[in-house]
Amino acid sequence: MTPIAAALKKHKNFIPIIFLLILSINTLINLITLEEAIDGVSYHRHFSIKNYLAFALLAILTVTYCYKRVWFKNLLAVFLLLSLANLINFTSGEYTGDLSFNSLSIGFGEIGFLLILSYFFINYKKVKAYIFSSVTIEKTAIEEEFYYNEELEKFKKNLGHYSNQELEGLIYANKLVPHAVIAAKQIIEERQSVDPQL
């Protein structure tokens, strides 16, 4: 692996931030140097509060990546959500998208959406592993519950011919495995619910 490839792999989560730094520098230059003519009069464009917030958060995110990387992922999540909600802006213009469902319209920042997509593709293996591990955990829990119920039914069948006194004696004598103890207690409870005098 070449040194450049190794560096890109090591700092892959910073690549979109580099893109935003370049975009922000371009926006700064454009807002400072370019004039806008309205009715023959030239005006300098002004920074919006969204620009100030974006530049400040981008600086904080860059410093965090360089010096306190343990905080980077949490700040990045906030940064991406603010960008997606179009509360921060890296350009001199507004670039927004809309999703419409009947009368409901949801606006989002296109740059934030592209950033989230880029992080998804950069970390695709980790995202895929996380999703499949969640599915595996649910499947394993269901399988364990099925196995647990199957074991209980097996012990209930084997212990069903014992009387309540014999089952209690086995429980107190510590002669049963934990699943068998639970099965014996359930047998006693079921018999007492049918006939309380047992």
Image: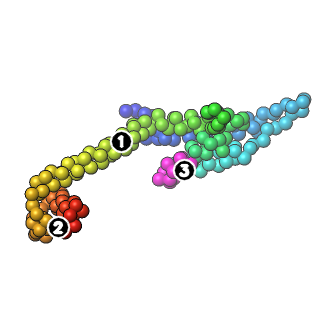
Q: Residue at x 30, y 48 (%)?
A: 141
Colouring method of the image: rainbow
- Dominant secondary structure of the magenta stretch? helix
**Separation of marks 2 and 1 at Cα, in angstroms:** 45 Å
State the residue at coordinates (10%, 54%). Answer: 158
Picture coordinates of residue 58 (x, y %)?
Answer: 61, 46
- Amino acid on which the number 3 mark rests in the picture: Leu
Can you tell which mark lies on residue 135? Answer: 1
Please indicate whether residue 12 sits to the left or right of residue 41 in the image: left
Report the side of 128 relative to 28 (left or right): left
Q: Quadrant of the N terminus?
A: top left
- Classify the position of the C terminus by image quarter: bottom left
* Residue drawn at the location 9% of the way across and 66% of the way down: 166
| Percent of width and height locating residue 130 | 39, 42
Tag 2 residue:
198
Vertical arrangement, residue 133 with respect to residue 96, above or below: below
Crowdedness of circle 3 by 10 Å Cα count: few (<14), some, many (20+)? Answer: some
Task: Assign a secondary structure to mark 2.
Answer: loop
Residue ID for mark 3: 75
The tag on residue 109 is: none
Specify start and end residues of the magenta stretch as a single range.
67-78
Q: What is the spatial separation of the Cα atoms under label 1 and label 3, in whole angstroms?
A: 27 Å
Magenta run includes residue 64: no
Is 32 displayed left or right of 39 in the figure?
left
Tell me what residue is drawn at x 53 percent, y 38 percent.
Answer: 116
N-terminal of the pair, mark 2 or mark 1, is 1
Q: Is residue 141 visible?
A: yes
* Residue toward you, 142 or 1: 142
- Amino acid carrying label 2: it is Leu
Residue 24 in view here: no
